[in-house]
Amino acid sequence: MDYLELTLNLSPRDPWAEILMTELSDLGYESFVETEEGLLAYAKVVDIDVNDPCKGSSIVDSEKEFTAAIEVKIIPQQNWNAVWESDFHPVFVEEQLSILAPFHEETQAKGLLVWIEPKMSFGTGHHQTTWMMSKALLDLTVLPNKVLDMGTGTGVLAIIAEKQGANEIVAVDIEEWSVENTLENAARNACSHIEALCGDVDVLEGRRFELILANINKNVLKAHMSAYVSMLEPAGKLIISGFFETDAEELILVAQSHGLTHTGSLSRETWAALTFEKR
């Protein structure tokens, strides 16, 4: 069966890449690859109107708040796997971590090894924010037992946390397919301490954590900050990303207004990650 490849170069890229991924999945697109410019989306040709491949999404909204350069290509069935695999390269977080897909050779790995098949979910390590979140997690001198991974996507951060010694991990995402993908990837990595939940912060009422990981966009991080603080144990840590360096100071001020202390920063190609402690 032939596939349609939809290339979207977006300005601004965020938060629209994530929003469009959700919208396009509802239209029949079944897998995605995030790029520096935007998004690649794939669907079976029989499931999509090739003449109007974005029908029903924000891309065709006359009042949209972004611009999109669109390209459409048909990929013959016999080339599909090779094309997808050629675009999905191993991810290395310095010498500390390797994130490989099932078709990669294990001999490429260095440091901690995590196997991820992303399907429709965000979080392969290719994006700068996931890379920094992984780096910040690996750099913790002591990893606590109780960890929350908000916006888990593929479950990659939850999996890293378990492989680093955490034994009570909750992974939350608003998309059911991400929850399913997290469970599949947890099993692929022989992880048995990850509880995956579909929903938002409301599904965590009464839960407490020693470490919260949140790789989400700036507006959601601001809206959730009070909830994160209420769920953090004393001396607990919050690590956040999903925003540009230019937004870091604003998020530091928001976190400080909720009683958190800024203890660390990372930046990578205009993106930022911040670490806070509840003292």
Image (cartoon, rainbow, N blue to C red):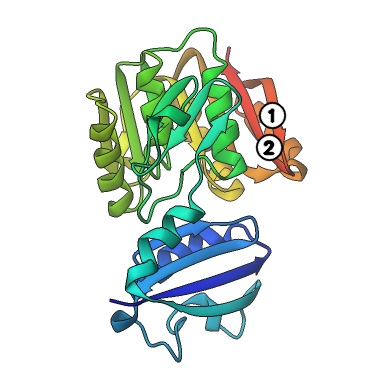
Q: Which of the pair 278/169 is nearer the observer?
A: 169
The answer to whether residue 148 is visible is: no
Mark 2 in CB contact with mark 1 (< 8 angstroms): yes
Residue 240's image quarter? Answer: top right
Expressed as whole percent of the image width and height from the top left, the position of residue 73 reads 49, 79
Instruction: Please report the residue visible at 55 percent of the width from the left and 42 percent of the height from the top.
Output: 221
Instruction: Please report the residue visible at 65 percent of the width from the left and 72 percent of the height from the top.
Output: 65
Q: Which of the pair 35/129 is nearer the observer?
A: 35
The answer to whether residue 241 is visible is: yes
Which residue matches tag 2?
A: 272
Crowding at mark 1 (Cα within 10 Å: few <14, some 14-19, many 20+): some
Q: Amino acid at mark 1?
A: Leu
Q: Residue furthest top?
A: 142
Q: Amino acid at mark 2?
A: Ala
C-alpha gap between disc 2 and disc 1: 6 Å
Instruction: Please report the residue visible at 57 percent of the width from the left and 45 percent of the height from the top.
Output: 127
Crowding at mark 2 (Cα within 10 Å: few <14, some 14-19, many 20+): many
Residue 147's image quarter? Answer: top left
Which residue matches tag 1?
A: 266
State whether residue 110 is above or below residue 179: above
Residue 260's image quarter? Answer: top right
State whether residue 250 is above or below residue 22: above
